Every structure is written in C-alpha cells, then in structure tokens.
Amino acid sequence: MRSSAPVTTDILLLGAGHAHVEVLRRFAMQPEPGVRLTLIGRENATPYSGMLPGLIRGDYTFDQAHIDLAPLAAAAGARLILGEAIAIDPAGRSIRVAGRPDIPFDLLSVDVGGTPAMPAGGGIPVKPIGRFLEQLNRLEAAAAPDARIAVVGGGPGGVELALALAHRFKGAPGVVLVSSTAVPLAGAPPSARRAARAALIDAGVALVSGVTAGACVDGVLPLSDGTALDVADALWATGVVAPAFLAESGLACDAAGCIAVDATLRSVSHDKIFAAGDCAALGRPKSGVWAVRAGAPLAENLRRAARGNPLQPWKPQREALAILGLGAGKAVAWRNGLAVSGTLVWRLKDWIDRRWMRMYTEMKMPADASDPMRCGGCGAKVGAEVLAAALDALPRRTSGDLLDGLGGRDDAAVSRPPAGQLLVQSVDHFRAFLDDPYVFGQVAAAHALSDIHAMGARPWSALAIASVPYGPGAKMRAELTAMLLGATEVLNADGCDLVGGHSAEAAEPALGFAVTGLADPGKVLRKSGLRPGDYLILTKPIGTGVVLAGHMRGLVKAAWLQAAIASMRVTNATAARLFLAHRASACTDVTGFGLAGHLTEMLTASRMSAVIWPEQVPVLPGALELAGQGIESTLAPENWRALPGGDAAPRTALLVDPQTSGGLLAGVSPDRAEACLTALLAAGMTAAIVGYVEPFGERLIRLAPVDPPLE
C-alpha cells in the first residue's frame, strides 16, 4: 500500500465525490513517484448519484449503487481516513477532522458535494445522499399510509426523486412535487417535459407548480401563495449550497459558498487547492455529469502540480446529455433541444451507469501488492527537530510515582515503584499495517497493553520504539506526531504514562512499546490454573488477520475494515478487571498465535485439554467470507500446528488466524461463568463462552458442536 520511494508531496483528497474516485482510479493505473494520496470520506462507501433513483425504486441494491472506498483506496495506494472535515487551514496547509489530529497536505483537492438550499430545519435534504437514505428509511417506517410526502424542487433531481418515491411507495404514502417554475423540468425541451409530466401523472404524483416552499414544521409545508400542504415531511432537491466551512476557511467562494476555481480547477485564491463537483463553482449546472467529467482533468492537474509543471485548462462541452429515469423501465433523454423517451433510453442509461460503476468496483491491486508482509529492520535516529516537535505535541500526564519522563528530556525515565507492588513487563512491536498513522498508533498501543491486562496488572509506564520513512522534516514530524498522539491517547486512557523511547528512520513506519505494569501479589493471572469444567470465555471477535491480509489485496469492504479497526482500538482493561472480579482461573490474550495457539499454551501450562465450539466463537464482519476465499495471514500456516488434522472450513481456519490487539481468553468456573459473561456483555464487549476445559487427553483441543461441559 506504500511506495518505497520517499514521499515528497502529500495530495489530500477531501471528499469521496465522483471526481475524486476517478482521481484514485487514474493514480492506481499510473502511480506518481514521491506522491502519497490520502482520501478523507464521511462514509465507508460513496453513492453514485445517477443510480440513486434506481436504488430508491429497488432497481439496484445498495452495493450496486455504491463504491466501497477501501478497495479503491487500496488499489491506488491511498491512505483512507473516515471522518467529518470541519475546517481547512489554507495557510498552514492542514485539514481539521473531528476527533483526531489535523491532517497536513501539500496539495488539496475538495470534492465534498453540497446540500440543497433550504430553510434551516425545514425538512430532509437529499444530499448528502448517505444521510438522506437513512432518514428516508426512518420516514417511510413512521409515515401513515394516508399521509403525503412532499418533494421540493422541480428540476431533474426533484422530478426523478418524486417518480422513484411514487414507484417505491405505490400510493401509500402519496407523493406531491412542489416546483417553483410553472412546469417541472422548465429548462428541458417541450417533448421531454411532456414525457416527464405524463410519467408523474401515471405514477400518481400530485403537482404544485409556480410556488416556493418554506420550512416544513409539524407536518405543515407553507407555500408562497399563502396556502400550505399537510405532509409527513418535505424532501428538498433544490439548488446546492456548499458546506459552510469552505467559505469560513478564507477560500474565495461564490454566493452559494462553492469554491471559485479557474479553468484548471484550481482555486482562484489559493494555488495549492483544487475543487470539483457540487462544491466547486464551475460555471456549469450542478450535476453528476460535470463531476464525473472533471475527474480526468483534475487528476492530470494534480499530477502536474506535484511535478511543478504548468497546468492544463479544462474545456468541457457546453451541454451534456441528460437522461432522467421515469420508472417502469422507461427514461427520457435530451440534448441540444432534442429529446427521446422510452424503454430503449432506460436500457441505455442502465448500461452507462453500470459500466461507470464497474470501472471503480472491479479494479485490481498491483501485481506485487499481495506479497506477504515481512518485518523490516530499523534505521538511523530521526532528526532532533523532528523528534522535539513530535514530543511537544503530546499531552502531558505524569503519575505521582514518575520522577522524570518525557517532560524532562533526560536520557532515561526515572520512576519509583509503589511499595508492595509486583512489576509486570512486556514488549510488542509492529511495522505499519494501516495507512492512517493516528489509528495505527492507537492499535499498536492497545496491542502492547494487552499482555499487561492479560496478567491482571495495571499498566504503569511505557517506552516507545518508533520508526518513520525518511523524507522532508515536516512529513516525518507529521507522521511521528500522529502515531504518538494516537498511542498516547490509548495509553493514558488506561492510566499508563509514555515516559520515553527511541525514534529511527526506516523504509516504512513501525511502532512498538515496552510496557511496565503493576500487580498486587496473589492477584496475578497466569496461563496455568485451568481446571476441568471451567468455561472458556473470549472477549473479542476474531478475524483481524484475514481482514488485514484481504485489505492488502483490495478485497475488503470499508465496513469490514472499520469493524476490525474498532475492535483493535479497544484495550482489554475492562475485560481484565471483570475476569479478576469473577476469579478467573487462568487468562491470556489472543494475538499472533491465534485462538487455538494461545489456548494450546494455556492447556500445556495447566496439563489440561479443552473442547471448542467453533460456531460459538464470535467473528468479525467479512472474516468468514475472506477465509472461504482462502485468504490468510502470513503466520497462519504455522499456527495450524495447534490444530493437527483440523479441517479447512472457514470457521476452523479462523481459529488459527493471527490476531492483532485481540481479546482475552479466560477460564472461569461453571458457577461464575454466566455472571461473568453477563457483566462483559453489559460493558459493551462482544464476549462469548466458546468451550470448556476437560481432563488431559490424547488431543489438547477437540472441536465439537455445542454440548454441555463435563460435570
């Protein structure tokens, strides 16, 4: 996912609009040496606006009408960050995303779309489409059969939406189209208007024309002629306004807040910023057609800007072919005053839309992208300025037992262990397996803390070993800072101080921690101690290995990847506390050796055997599908030694899947297991009883359907 060449230019793609997916596709086909792409998207998948009416009608499934961002970003070698941008700092060249450190850029392209121009709180905006679909589902579930839903906007978007809703609802609830013009589609040729009007009448859509609408409040939609409509709600498909933060950033914008760009799609006020789609003032109607067509020139000019070459002006045609779905297998198309409608037009539209989607949903990873990742070596220390700036950005948290740590900048941390406490120490180290350094830092820290929690200890202090690729000082500083900020957030939440460490240059990012914990004598959890009849409780779903391996190959949906990341970011602090409270007999964390491998360690130490119920083991979304395709992590073949003779079924394969920041596996006596599981679930964990311990036998682990444990 990362080029071996030093990164000299960071291109940040803000928004996953139609133009940006084309930028990703073109950079995937022809990578640019020294350029790193980062895509910031609000949601896992980006919808294709041309298929939205068909999705609403039921002509397409969600997946057919959406581009999953994870495989596309992986194919382009782009970092994918899912979050909501709230500000741009053009002078400092960074983007502020809620809940994480600012993201720096050298070149920025904005394709965040917009929202319909409507009164605040006056109904449901059709854009952003992802949020609209959620609200539409809730509205449909709540609306009475005899209610009406208003669509405000008589342009192509409003007409097509009204028709799609009418076919979906089949009259219950009804649909009314409110148009400010005398007739819907006022800018289309007369024959196109007639075809659309006939389709609206046939679908049972009521028409209210020549009036503007106000805010819909308590089921009343006021109109400019003094009348009002009683409706369940109003859906707005009117002219687009851009997100407010664009104009607030100081970028030159038009009256609708859209970024003013020249013929090269570059901001007229800031030469390192580009824009396309609905949020750009292109001098063209707000339409997906222009966003799609802007993708190719935008990609070319971003490439040229990164090289320092002159930009090329884009000269779009004056008028584009418009095709509007009428439902019932028909559509109407027009261009240059000519229009045609019927079933053949719909087939053409359907063919165009599906072909466009295939360009982004059937991309293949580069040939060498599926090679198994192997650990790399370390390099020289990073520069003093880089390190100092990264440390200055970290929050300061110092426990009373710490005499000197990062704040003092001495050669080593000095601490005084509390009297009567045992020291528990562990170390873990990762090369980067996620392209987002902030999230990678969080996961690396959570994983490093896991051994301490598995022993029933309290994390106390940590030393970091961090490596970043060589490059300009600002880029190394940003990478190191993001990693350490993410890590510090997780460490501090578990009461652990980052007290020092070592930083180095390397071919790729890497991060590890040596963690020291404190434990009360007599309360240390160990791998030994399992007893016959103990239930085995697992506190996290398994499958991170196959999900990460599948992501390297561009096979993982963004939702699957985000579910894995969400699991890996959570530490085992609460699970350890609850296992201690319910007097677990033994405990370990499930990491590189997989569930079967770590259970084998417990059974060997305890001189016991166990029965595992594979169907009861919780798994991450997508893990079974990937395992069924034969996807496995590098260490998985070696882990099969824990299950000699095991079948190749996906659920069995996941038992040997190496885990990153996995859960805890503990033995709990039968009289306490149910209460322990209830407490774990109440704390928000995906916990389950996955088997039980039996006396030592011929096989350490036996797989079986769910059955009661031995008495």
Image (tube, rainbow, N blue to C red):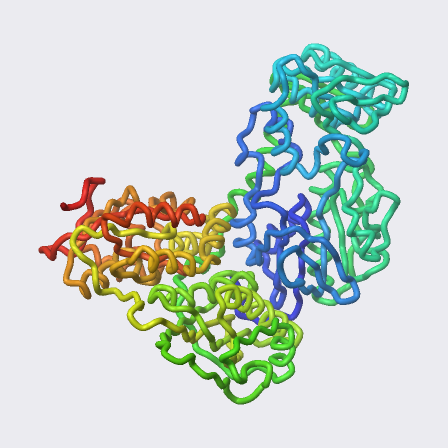
Point out residue 478 in the picture as x, y percentages from the top left corner. 63, 70
What residue is rendered at 73% in x and 19% in y? 231
On screen, 285 above or below 147? Answer: below
Quarter of the image that includes the C terminus: top left
Give x and y (percent) for residue 514: 42, 76
Between 453 and 598, the one nearer to me in the picture = 453
User: Which quadrant of the structure image shows residue 662?
Assistant: bottom left
Q: Based on the displayed image, in which of its 4 quarters is residue 311 positioned?
A: bottom right
Q: Is residue 71 visible?
A: yes
Percent position of residue 372, x then y: 39, 62
> Residue 19: where, in percent of width, then height?
68, 46
Say if 614 sits above or below 660 in the image.
Answer: above
Q: Residue at the location (65% across, 82% down)?
A: 385
Residue 467 drawn above or below residue 439: below
Residue sticking out furthest to the front: 419
Q: Quadrant of residue 194?
A: top right
* Residue at screen point 51% across, 75% down: 466
In the image, residue 329 sits, relative to residue 471, either above or below, namely: above
